[in-house]
Image (cartoon, rainbow, N blue to C red):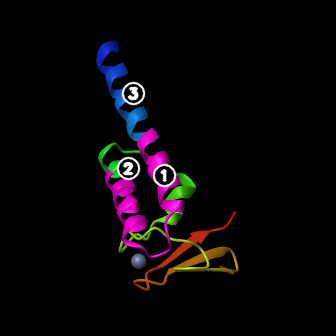
Amino acid sequence: MSNKVASAKASRKDNAREEIYRFAELADRCIANSVDANRFAAKIWRRALKHKIKLGLMGRRICRSCHAWLFFGKNARVRVRTGKVVITCLSCGHIRRVRLR
Ligand SMILES: [Zn+2]
């Protein structure tokens, strides 16, 4: 891959990453379970898949099943089990278990 192509790819990814952070901020200002919040979550999800961007901890804020933006304590239940964090989406009931370390 030439340098030109590589830098074009890097800036495309950077732009998408910036967009994702902006959408996350906007989603956080919405009301839990609102159409707006979930629309931002869908936008984040689509960009992450398309540009192969890792969401890190932000990935836990989006339901893997219905792509709702999760507000812990409002439309998502968070429980700590032995060695795991269990995040339940209260809109669709999808359960996600994250290993603690
Ligand atoms: Zn869900």
Q: Considering only vertical position in the picture, is 79 above or below 48?
A: below
Do labels 1 and 2 touch, CB within 8 Å? yes
Residue at point 32%, 22% (across, down): 8
Q: Residue furthest top?
A: 3
Residue at point 53%, 61% (across, down): 29
Q: Main secondary structure of the magenta part?
A: helix
Residue at point 38%, 40% (across, down): 16
Along the polypeptide, which appears first: circle 1 or circle 2?
2
Q: Which mark is residue 12?
A: none
Say which of 68 and 36 sits in front: 36
Where residue 90 sits: x, y (%)?
Answer: 48, 84
- Secondary structure state at the residue bearing disc 1: loop
Where residue 21 sits: x, y (%)?
Answer: 49, 46
Q: Amino acid at mark 3?
A: Ala
Q: Which mark is residue 10?
A: 3
Alpha carbon separation for disc pair 3 and 1: 17 Å
Please tell me in which quarter of the rendered image ligand 1 is found: bottom left
Alpha carbon separation for disc pair 1 and 2: 7 Å
Q: Can you identify the residue that label 2 sits on?
A: 48
Q: Which residues are magenta?
A: 18-46
Along the polypeptide, which appears first: circle 3 or circle 1?
3
Q: Amino acid at mark 1?
A: Leu
